[in-house]
Amino acid sequence: MKQEKKLIAGLIVLSLAAASCRSHYELNSVERSRILVDRRYDVQPDASIEAFLAPFKQKVDKEMNPVVGKAAKYLEAKRPESPLSNLLCDILMWGSKSYNEKPDFSVYNIGGIRAAIAQGEVTKGNIVDVAPFENKICFLSLKGDAVMQLFNQIAMRKGEGVSHGVELTMTEDWKLVSARLNGEEINPERTYRIVTIDYAAQGNDGMSAFKQKTDLVSPQEEENNVRYIIMDYFREKMNEGKAVDSDVEGRIKIVGN
């Protein structure tokens, strides 16, 4: 027993001694630097890495390279109004017929448009770049007073995509002056049917007025992803021998305070 006690005591002393010899590290500063990743790294590519990636690249290219249509010009998305945001809203209106819906107007959040479309041939991969998220087409109803709340929120966000027929006038400090649909004032007592994407319909991107929605139709199957609807539109125009085009047409106007 005495030997065991001596052994335990010795172990405790060694443990304390080891602990006292440990280094104590303290963070004194943090430094950072910017590493630019550009084409300079393509000068001497790693052959083994290229060989490893080759079969995956072939699969991706096979999936993404098919041409779905043509663009008449460069189409980009920006606030308050732009060719691409106008186009995508009009495509939502066009695609509504497949769901037996006749919406009054559409909304597409600018934040959900992640790339521009270059002039010329448009591939499936180009459309995936524009709409990379799993957003689905969505239909809902809002009373006129909620529609005005929505348009006020769009003004506060310095614009979002709206379809042809919507006329929003805003001040330079992004306050809504007036809102018309197909030349008519918004009737606060009327119910309006709207097509958008499910992400926006949930009240995201500052458009909380959508939370007042009724009669929601929000199909969640993969084929209802907006990217496929966009592709179908481009294919239809290609079959008609037409290049897809879109312009800024004054859907959102800015006036002095």
Image (cartoon, helix red, strand yellow):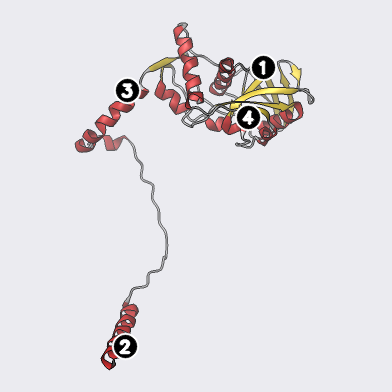
Q: Secondary structure at mark 3?
A: helix
Residue at mark 1 to residue at mark 2: CA–CA distance: 88 Å
Of callouts 2 and 4, which one flags the residue occurring earlier in the amino acid sequence?
A: 2
Of callouts 1 and 2, which one flags the residue occurring earlier in the amino acid sequence?
A: 2
Of callouts 1 and 4, which one flags the residue occurring earlier in the amino acid sequence?
A: 4
Q: Nearer the viewer, residue 158 or 141?
A: 141
Left or right, 46 with respect to 256, comes to left
Q: Amino acid at mark 4?
A: Gly
Q: Which residue is mark 3?
A: 62
Q: Which residue is mark 4?
A: 159
Q: Amino acid at mark 1?
A: Gly
Closer mark to the observer between disc 3 and disc 2: 2
On the question of residue 123 being in view, the answer is yes
Closer mark to the observer between disc 1 and disc 2: 2
Q: Report the residue at 38% width, 69% height from top.
A: 25
Residue at mark 1 to residue at mark 3: CA–CA distance: 39 Å
Q: Are marks 1 and 4 in contact (CB under 8 Å)?
A: no
Q: Residues within 10 Å of mark 3 (few under 14, many from 20)?
A: few
Q: Secondary structure at mark 1?
A: loop
Left or right, 43 with respect to 96, comes to left
Closer mark to the observer between disc 1 and disc 4: 1
Q: Which mark is residue 165?
A: 1
Closer mark to the observer between disc 3 and disc 4: 3
Of callouts 1 and 3, which one flags the residue occurring earlier in the amino acid sequence?
A: 3
